[in-house]
Image (cartoon, rainbow, N blue to C red):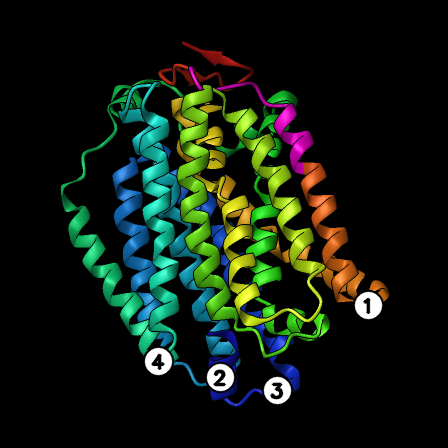
Amino acid sequence: MRVKSLADIGVAPDKILDEGSYVINMQMGGLLLGGILWGVIGDKLGRIKVLFGSIFLYSVANFVNGMVHDVNSYAVIRFIAGVGLAGELGAGITLVSETLSKERRGYGTTIVAMIGLLGAVAAAYVGKYDWRTAYYVGGGLGIVLLLLRMGTFESGMFKNIHDKDVSKGNIIMLFNNRKRFFKYMCCILIGAPLWYVVGILITQAPEFGKALGATAPLSAGTGIMYTYIGISVGGVGAGLLAQFSRSRKNTMYIFLLLSIISVMFYLSTKGITPSQFIWLCFFMGFAVGYWATFVTIASEQFGTNIRSTVTTTAPNFVRGSLIPINFAFNALMVHFGRINAGYFMMIILTGIALFATSQLRESFDKDLDYVEDEELNMTT
């Protein structure tokens, strides 16, 4: 809804790209702040409180977003919505990881992420009508979701350490030990290519279409819809592959390589047609469908006392990485053009993600019932 909404509030056509980047960067900034806030709350006060609080905040913000009439108000509300949006996925994945057995938790986290990502498909349909209505519908559905979550139970692992004398939700623990910090950074970096594909290659589809000599204007809304359908299908594929191969790392390797192949096809399709665009979006979405696997890996790398902090901050730092990725992409585009910049960024980000994956230990069979020592490693 970027183009329609900005044009409707009076943004000139030649300013839509810049103002759109401003608005989404504000949202990503909210995700960064919210990831830290909700992650700490989840480890200190419980996963359920994060679920309820985050859903309520982003639902109200989305509803108010339908009333904006200028860019600055739009950006501020998206920032608040970003803070709210930051909490739910991490809390949900943490709950599932700590509730199911180590042999089955991969199935659970896959289902959570797959169903959630299908929300983007519904948003694409609603967005075809009126962008203000789309925000109202999004806010209303959030309140419905909040009511449906009322029967959710708290994690048993969290309850076991709640009254114990152990540091909980201490984000400093992720930075005061070199090995732990390096592991945390690797968890974040393995997800960066996914958000680059969604946040730039698909969101800026109209501009990429012009650069490729598209036979008709490409729709970012259509692209998002089919990309997220692909992500949902790919999420199931990645989850099942990890379960059958008993290796989340090998699954990441396969999907990261597949993602760079899909982007190469997209950026080399001269004279792209709308139908080709749809299939390429589905292909790219499928290839970056490792979102649930990536978040599960992050959740499995750390102890119960900071697991919510990690599981909530990691995906939101990946989303927030779109800010520096945007700057880097725009800098490359000035010197090399849009298409070449697209190639360079994907190669760089995938290379970093492959290296980061190689530095993490396989966690498929890992027992998660332990806590991190405040000074150094872990205590069972």
Amino acid type indicated by mark 4: Tyr
Q: Is residue 140 above or below residue 249?
A: below
Q: Nearer the viewer, residue 278 or 49?
A: 278
Judging by the rendered image, the residue that carries numbered circle 2 is 70
The residue lying furthest to the right in this view is 335
The residue lying furthest to the top in this view is 380
Distance from the alpha carbon under mark 2 to that under mark 3: 15 Å
Q: Earlier in the sequence, mark 2 or mark 3?
A: 3
User: Which mark, residue 129?
Assistant: 4
Magenta segment, which residues? 353-365
Q: Earlier in the sequence, mark 2 or mark 4?
A: 2
Q: Nearer the viewer, residue 297 or 316?
A: 297
Judging by the rendered image, the residue that carries numbered circle 3 is 13
Amino acid type indicated by mark 1: Val
Q: Earlier in the sequence, mark 2 or mark 1?
A: 2
Q: Are marks 4 and 3 in contact (CB under 8 Å)?
A: no
Task: Classify mark 2: residues with Cα within 10 Å, few (<14), some (14-19) or many (20+).
Answer: few
